[in-house]
Amino acid sequence: MTVARSSGAIRAARARAAPGSRASASRPRARSSSSVVAPGAGSKAITCASRGSSARTSASFAACAGEMGQACVPGPYCEKPVKLTGAGDRFNAGFGLGLLLQLPAEQRLRLLVGHAEVMPAGGGVGEAGRCRLMIAAPLFHSWGFFHFVISLPTSSTIVLRRRFDEEETLRGVQDHRAEVLAVVPVMLQRILQLPEETLAAYDLSALRITSLSGSALPGELATAWMDRFGDNVYNLYGSTEVAYATVATPEDLRAAPGTAGRAPRGTVVRLYDEAGREAPQGEVGRIFVGNEMSFEGYTGGGGKEVIDDLLCSGDVGHFDADGRLFIDGRDDEMIVSGGENVFPREVEDLLADHEAVVEVAVIGVEDEEYGQRLKAFVVASAEADVSEDELKSHVKANLAGYKAPREVEFLEELPRNATGKILKRELHAREAQKQA
């Protein structure tokens, strides 16, 4: 593996970071050609040698990014540049530097300092937030890429693989004594589906944080992981538009499986009804979020609804008596069946708890009598023998009768995108094609 020497972007970053420089007062450009080649067949640890902590200024971040491109910026936080070797696919490491440098100085510093509060991967692990971090989440997705970029100024060791593999992920955590594992929920699910003897063969005792986001985390999945590997699951709820909203700690997930947690410092989360009034505690409402990292609008124009300077996440949820947020579904997924409002998420969580169900997705489909009805798509365990009627009865025994799906279809797998998120639009298209 070769490492390309960074371009003038690093020199420009150095000039902008210099105290009193004219460049430091202007808005920096997001240009950099530094690149790194990711490991091939096996996992490989890479370390950025800058001494900066998460509270360092952009100067230390520039120095660290410079090392990754073998063009170390001279300064008090810069040690000898690191040279990486190996084979694999190329990805842009300079983009993160350019993106961060575009932010106003105050916001940039808040992001780095706030990392210790918002993200469990920062602070509290090793010296000055330094840790051994395995990123299994894809780097082209914000969750994996964020862990990569934000770990540079903390001088963390980063372990990467070219492709996700369940057992190789366990091996990577064990061999590199990783303290943090960054994943999306479907990866945890697939790891736990490995044979018992395979799971028992790996020592994950060094793992202190399993950092999750990217899609809904079923409560029983978090519990199953913690029962085996310890109480180390932290789940972040957010979106591209609102950035982060809440974080669920292991204590939250033990006390209230399925919760999205509480808002971290510097973030406000409120629920509003359709009339724009704040929803009472315990009642379902639309989720609105305010923090320093929410977006300013779409590139094609327009944005999200705003109430009291808070941005709509597009989800609906409720708070429990202890202030924990629960996501009840997307506001555009609610269906009206026979005059009753139903959110598929509640039914999905219940069916996912069934011992014969591996994964499930529930959607609303057209119905001549009720207007809409629920249909469940289920992937059943290979060892289980479960029927449609049994699953319907399971829902009726635990939820109101009108929330039971009228139809259950068994599939070998659910359609997902590259980050593991279930593609319900494909299930809707499948149903539309049947009806046509």
Image (cartoon, rainbow, N blue to C red):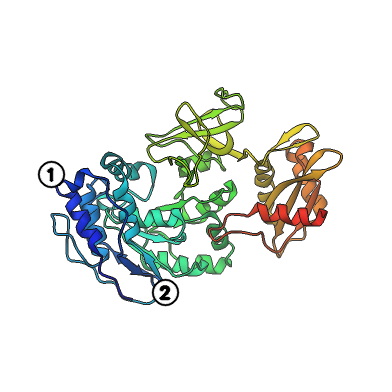
Q: Which quadrant of the figure has residue 346?
A: top right
Label 2, secondary structure: give it. loop
Question: Is 18 situated above or below 65?
Answer: above
Q: Which quadrant of the figure has residue 192?
A: bottom right
Outermost residue toward the right in this view: 369
Residue 151 visible (yes or no) = no
Residue 220 visible (yes or no) = yes
Contact flag, marks 1 and 2 (Cβ < 8 Å): no
Point out the tag, 1 or 2, that comes first from the N-terminus. Answer: 1
Q: Quadrant of the C terminus?
A: bottom right
Label 1, secondary structure: give it. loop
Q: Amino acid at mark 2?
A: Gly
Q: CA distance from mark 1 to mark 2?
A: 46 Å
Q: Residues within 10 Å of mark 1 (few under 14, many from 20)?
A: few
- Closer to the camera, 291 or 20? 20
- Describe residue 297's horizontal placement relative to residue 380 as left or right: left
Residue appearing at x 28%, y 54% in the figure: 130
- Closer to the camera, 356 or 164? 164
Q: Quadrant of the N terminus?
A: bottom left
Q: Amino acid at mark 1?
A: Gly
Outermost residue toward the front in this view: 300
Q: Find disc 1 in the rendering and name its residue.
A: 20
Q: Position of residue 149 (x, y in %)?
A: 34, 55
Q: Residues within 10 Å of mark 2 (few under 14, many from 20)?
A: some
Q: Position of residue 125 (x, y in %)?
A: 32, 51
Q: Can you tell which of label 1 and label 2 is closer to the viewer?
A: 1
